[in-house]
Image (spheres, rainbow, N blue to C red):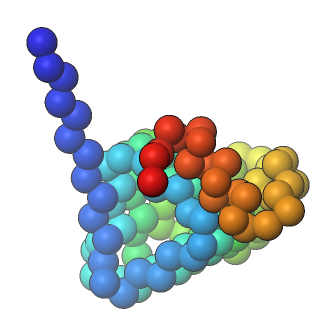
Amino acid sequence: MSHRTLSTIIINGNTKIGNYCCLSNNIIIADGHPKKIGNDVFLGSNVVLAKSVIIADGCKISSNSFVNRNALINNVLLGGVVAQEIKSIIAWTEEEPYKTEKARCENLKIALKIID
């Protein structure tokens, strides 16, 4: 028996996404408005970014959230419909410091079992 999973990420051409972001499945960032997603941002499954939102560096948005307001404070956990700040969080770089960006990418590949 085979199991097939379909995932979709829809992104508007005016959206700017920073470095080292992690986007889960079924993300919608396409309503015609420009958006800016900072560095080290995590978007959980089924997240919708609406309007011209700005997501600050290090923010994590929980699954099934609808974001229609700016998140201008770094390293914040957001969630809900309409998404609100839940709490401040530790930056990814502070949780697992890496000597170089290459080491960070290599560790991510190992964790995700990606083979070059």
> Which residue is at a point 84% across and 48% down the rendered structure image?
95
Is 108 in front, or is 11?
108
Examine the image and state in which quarter residue 58 appears.
bottom right
Horizontally, residue 59 falls left or right of residue 115, namely: right
Q: In which quarter of the image is the C terminus?
A: bottom left
Across the whole image, how many numbered discs are drawn on residues? 0
The furthest residue to the front: 116
Q: Where is residue 40 in the image (x, y as percent from the top left)?
A: 65, 64
Query: Quadrant location of residue 19?
Result: bottom right
Quadrant (top left, top right, bottom left, bottom right) of the N terminus: top left
Going by the picture, which residue comes out furthest to the left?
Answer: 1
The part of the image, by quadrant, that contains residue 21 is bottom right
Q: Where is residue 71 in the image (x, y as percent from the top left)?
A: 64, 68
Q: Which residue is drawn at 72% across and 67% down?
A: 101
Q: Is residue 84 visible?
A: no
> Is residue 90 positioned above or below 69 on the image?
above
Q: Residue at x 31, y 84 (%)?
A: 13
Looking at the picture, tell me which residue is in the foreground, 110 or 43: 110
Residue 11 percent location from the top left of the image: 32, 71
Residue at 26 percent of width and 46 percent of height = 7
Q: Is residue 42 left or right of residue 24?
A: right
Would residue 7 be visible to someone looking at this image? Answer: yes
